[in-house]
Amino acid sequence: MGRIASHVPYLRRFARALSGSRHLGDAFVSETLKALIEGRASLEGSPDARAALFRAFFSTWRSLDIHDTIASAGDPGFGVDRRLQALGPLNRLVFLLSFMEGFNESEIAWITDRRRDDIRALIEAAERAIDHQLETRVLIIEDEWLIAADVKRVVEDMGHIVVGVASRRETAVAQAKILRPGLILSDIQLDDDMAGINAVEEILEAFSVPVVFVTGHSDRLLTGSGLEPTYVVGKPFDDATLRAVISQALFFEAATSAPVNVGEA
């Protein structure tokens, strides 16, 4: 297990984004590690420990009773049926493996036990889905203006509207309460302290909104303990990674707010 220890935080990042939930993502990772310890999953077949860990995760994820996993995770988010609907598309799993975790098509094919041609088609399907996402209003919390400008460019290229850029906690909270954005992109640190996280916590007390943390200190947010976020993008980021995580956050937000049909749990 020692050869995969350094990769576990990044599996946790991936699992949280895939499931749209810190609680559920961490539960999937725990089940994967348990399967490895008990011999129900293996790290054999690749000299790349990271790829082998993600293959073990995928194998375990496919074999789990997801209803039971959701219940055991104590997920405070939306209901079981809604979560299952959102977890469905394999194209999003493949898209995140590619653009968030940086695996190439051959590696993804091995991780998911699929043909390379299938992987390319799944990635293209996910990209088309992103292009058809409804636009939302975005608040950026970042005290480095060059980075804020880069984030703004990516957000606007995706068709969203940046309604504010705040570099201080007080400004961020005030803008959020007035503007009511549909998404927040925030750094952890403002002025060398944890004011970014504190601002987000205060905003979430006022209303619910998906948050993506864009930070150079992602290791602090991937330990599996305490109040940690669901969506994390490391600095320096590339456009594709940020696009992928923004898309996933809005995907689950849409699933959460979708009307429930008669007869649906």
Image: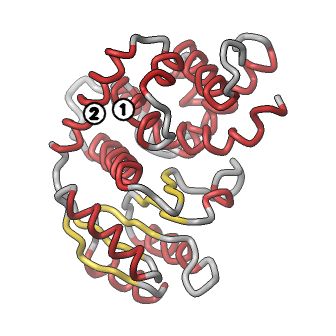
Residue 51: x, y in percent?
61, 27
Image vertical order of residue 65 relative to residue 79, above or below: above
Q: Find the residue positioned furthest to the right.
A: 2
Residue at x 75% of width, y 23% of height: 34
Whether residue 161 sits left or right of residue 246 in the image: it is left
Residue nearer the viewer, 186 or 242: 242
Q: Please tell me how crowded label 2 is: few (under 14), some (14-19), or many (20+) other residues with Cα within 10 Å.
A: many
Amino acid at pointer 1:
Arg
Whether residue 212 sits left or right of residue 149 in the image: it is right
Residue at x 19% of width, y 67% of height: 161
Whether label 2 touches label 1, CB < 8 Å: yes
- Label 2 to label 1, Cα distance in Å? 6 Å
For label 1, the residue is 92
Q: Please tell me how crowded label 1 is: few (under 14), some (14-19), or many (20+) other residues with Cα within 10 Å.
A: many
Residue nearer the viewer, 220 or 27: 220
For label 2, the residue is 126
Res. 152 image quadrant: bottom left
Residue 5: x, y in percent?
77, 38
Image vertical order of residue 12 relative to residue 189, above or below: above
Residue 261: x, y in percent?
20, 30
Point out the tag, 2 or 1, that comes first from the N-terminus: 1
- Split into 4 quadrants, where in the image is the C terminus? top left
- Split into 4 quadrants, where in the image is the N terminus? top right
- Callout 1: SS: helix
Residue at x 84% of width, y 33% of height: 2
Residue nearer the viewer, 144 or 80: 144
Residue 96: x, y in percent?
43, 37
- Callout 2: SS: helix
Res. 148 image quadrant: bottom left
Amino acid at pointer 2:
Ala
